[in-house]
Image (cartoon, rainbow, N blue to C red):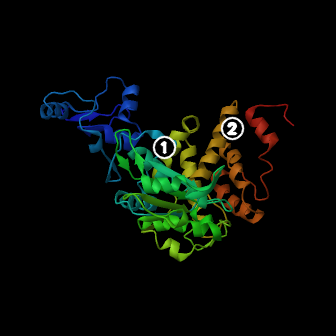
Amino acid sequence: MTENILVCKQCGAEVKDYLGNHLLEEHQLTVPNYLEKYPGALVVSKRLWAQFQTNNKGKRREHPCPPEKLVLSLSGVEFPVNSDVPESACLPMPDHYQLPRYGKLGEDVAHTLISLRFQRSLYVWGLPGSGKDALFHAWSAMTRTPALIRQVKPGTDIEAWFYSRGFTEKGTFWEEGAVLKALRDGYVTSTGRRLPYLILITDFDRADREQAEHLRLITDSIQGRIDGPAGTTFTVLPGTTIVATANTSGGGDERGRMISANPLDASLLDRFKRKFKFHWMDWRDESVIIQAKFPVLLQRAPSILPTMKDVTKKLREAILNGDLHAEFSHRALCDVLEHAQDIMISSKKLNKHLLTFAVRTWVDGLPDEENRLAAKQILDPRLGVLSEGDTSHIGVESLASMVGDKNAN
């Protein structure tokens, strides 16, 4: 082994000179987290450390380069890591997150990361469970970018995000909201650096007419200014990134599945510099997450993975072709597997029809009998025991025999 090659104890990968970027990107581990897990492990090569000591006259430091020089590579796009920003100021890392790299979603994410690197405003839309919000949570957590998130809920007061009228015994006054402060002032680190925020607005297409007018304050901020109360205008801190996520492209509910989505004024959407549609995850990415989420299930029943690959592919093809009025997102897939794991842990023996029992959690949620029948026609050849008429046989008696409860009614 050469002096500039390190071996990751988490996965065995060989990395040149410094493990920090690899740990963050591949395992969502910081160097301190890694050293807690593997005390005494090397994170800096002997060659790089010797060079650093020479360049710095032998002075000891905790890291081979100053914090502001740390760089993280995500899908080939390099980002500075704000090591002086605490996790509490960022969005939380989603559990078992895997940066999508394959298929259409891998391309979607790559384009989005390039836009984030150059601090472009973004409108990201796509089917439920395609990882729209998760990407920005993960990016904020991994790069330690301070972030503020707000969800659009029809009927709520969005204006208060920016300012509201307060009352005291001396009279009324304008009170500045958290979003206005974040846009104008940014985040000040413990070392005194002033950093721009990521402002994430979710469910952007659910805004009603009145809310949409207040959202103009967000889109105006993309232009570098923000209107305050009583006619005041503030400058937005340069580098602030505005991101909106939605299930539709702004034209309303064209699929008949997102009935709370509203058409958006074209002048709002036109302000966003980049607009991307997110697709469902490629199985090569999805399977890695599934294996991390359900280790007990897949250890005891490894054949479930290839079966669910086939089921997922066929269901999504039917949905995208318009043959099935439903959704089978990554979230739905995980719900089925989670129920399978719950049943298996509760059982005294492994049943070959485990997936048939578990898929009920999705089939029963379809909107009508026509769609349930269409789903069963896809599932029957793959799971084997779904009837065309109903799923009543997947009930108390069958489940009781599966878990060994002879006295169940």
- Give the residue displayed 50% in from the left and 40% down from the top: 292
- Give the residue displayed 41% in from the left and 54% down from the top: 101
Q: Name the amino acid, label 1.
A: Met
Indicate the quadrant where residue 401 lies: top right
Q: Nearer the viewer, residue 7 or 89?
A: 89
Residue 13 placement (x, y as % from top left): 32, 38
* In the depicted structure, whether residue 160 falls above or below residue 338: below
Q: Earlier in the sequence, mark 2 or mark 1?
A: 1
Helix, strand or loop at mark 2: helix
Which residue of the protein is positioned furthest toward the front in this rendering? 170
Side of 348 where 408 appears, left or right: right
**Quadrant of the snapshot with the C terminus:** top right
**Quadrant of the snapshot with the N terminus:** top left
Which residue of the protein is positioned furthest toward the bottom in this rendering? 266
* In the depicted structure, whether residue 178 falls above or below residue 203: above
Picture mark count? 2
Residue 93's disc is 1
- Give the residue displayed 48% in from the left and 60% down from the top: 243
Residue 221 placement (x, y as % from top left): 46, 64
Helix, strand or loop at mark 1: loop
User: In front of the other: label 2 or label 1?
Assistant: 1
Q: Are marks 2 and 1 in contact (CB under 8 Å)?
A: no
Side of 236 where 70 appears, left or right: left
Mark 1, other Cα within 10 Å: few <14 / some 14–19 / many ≥20? some
Q: Which residue is mark 2?
A: 343
Q: Is residue 131 visible?
A: no
Q: Name the amino acid, label 2.
A: Ile
